[in-house]
Amino acid sequence: MTFNEALSYVYSRKKFAKSSSLERISALLFALSEPQKKLRFIHVLGTNGKGSVSVMTASCLTAAGYRTGLFTSPFVESFCERIQIDSRYISETDFCRLTEAVRKKSESLPQQLQPTFFEFILAVALLYFCEQKCDLVVLEAGIGGRDDSTSVIPAALVTVFTCISLDHTELLGDTVEKIAANKAGAIKRGSTVVSFPAEDGGFDFCPQQECVKEILCRESRKHGCRIVFPDMKKAHILGESMFKTQLEYDSLSFSLRLPGEHQLANAACALESIKALRTLGYTVTDEAIRKGMESAFLPARTEIVRAEPLTVIDGGHNEGASKTLARFIDRFFSGRRVTLLAAYMKDKDYEAAIEILAPRCENIVFTLCDEHRGENPSVLAGYAEKYCGNVLFECDMNEALKKADSLLHSDSALVIAGSFYLAGAVRKNFIC
């Protein structure tokens, strides 16, 4: 296979199956000699912040000298971003080779066991991590927990839950309690559980809701697992800018390239996960943590991509992510005239996102990020008009960027948000 042929084949897989179960991924991995049973995992689940916690944890483990695999999604510019070892993407050659290997095994399975898109990619990743003899793998879940394909793994060394809120309600349930119960279904006996902070410690972020805390504690007790909640009274912001933040947690200070006050809670989760690994005999020094945190980076997470005119890209698409972006705008763009370039998928709660972001904007330009799944930009514009005085739309993303740029002044800021598809499409215009 060429790389484009491999991608075409992967994208030809169904996105979702009619039934949620681990039967398909289990059958595929069995055919591949069960690579997941030869690896040790840090399993990261939740709604928002999974990518940040995953990359922080993986970066610290790499800095400590462990060969560390990272499976994450979505990607921004390169599909190979999904599968990394020590911050290096899987090569196109290895991706093609392993896609061919997984294809042969999957096509030998009966029709009812044919893997979905996500299950197929997960199998490629696990095969790669096993082949490359990773010491540890940081595995970011897809959707949910109990039936999420990543839950096919044995008990993780550490099971991490980032902030849990409403998202994918059509699949996980229409309340936070239902979603939390689904995600908590990933807890297995033998794992240490780390949860997003349940107390805000005086910081302006949304802590884990009390109902979520109760569900996680109940499931942890049920499986005999210790559960840890970071103590945000031990957390401090020592200095910050829109580019990076100087943080302290539990007397350990470090610099983080992921900006925003909310990242302090994510960093606390990652550090509690590292502390749990230390109790299991893994050696991760304070210096390795400092080096790892400094190196940790994710594109399109409140990422400043242009200084003049000031431009930030954020791929967050749900209500929680929009609140986080709004706090970032209030904190760093105060006094600037904000223009928003946005696109949303039909299946996302874009109304809540628009209600949060639109009142902060002087101008909004909506565009179309996916021909099949993207919401019509004219529909988005119609909804936003009651919150913002100047709302435009342009279906072509590059033309929409030009239109948004034409609205900027010397005291303006451009915010690009709502979809990782949009972020990936326009980010290449700023990053060489």
Image (tube, grey):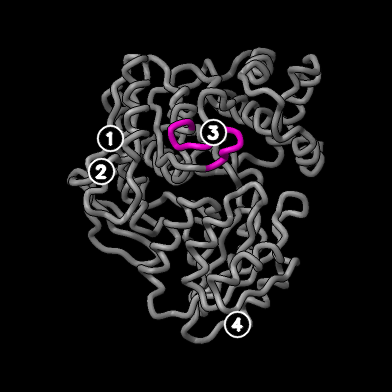
Q: Which residue is mark 4?
A: 407
Q: Nearer the viewer, residue 130 or 373?
A: 373
Amino acid under disc 3:
Gly
Give the alpha-carbon distance from disc 1 to disc 2, as whole Å. 9 Å
Give the label, 1 or 2, closer to the camera.
Answer: 2
Q: Which residue is mark 1?
A: 229
Secondary structure of residue under mark 3 = loop
Amino acid under disc 1:
Phe
Disc 1 + disc 2, Cβ < 8 Å: yes
Marking on residue 173: 3
Q: Earlier in the sequence, mark 4 or mark 2?
A: 2
Is residue 67 something that shows in the picture? no
Q: Please report the bounds of the magenta region as a residue range.
A: 167-178
Quadrant for residue 315, please give it.
Answer: bottom right
**Quarter of the image with the C terminus in it:** bottom right
Quadrant for residue 376, please give it.
Answer: bottom right
Residue 253: image location, x then y, percent? 23, 51
Residue 208 colored in magenta in the image? no
Amino acid under disc 4:
Leu
Give the alpha-carbon distance from disc 1 to disc 3, as whole Å. 25 Å
Marking on residue 199: 2
Residue 163: image location, x then y, percent? 40, 41
Give the alpha-carbon distance from disc 3 to disc 4, as whole Å. 41 Å
Residue 200: image location, x then y, percent? 26, 48
Secondary structure of residue under mark 4 = loop
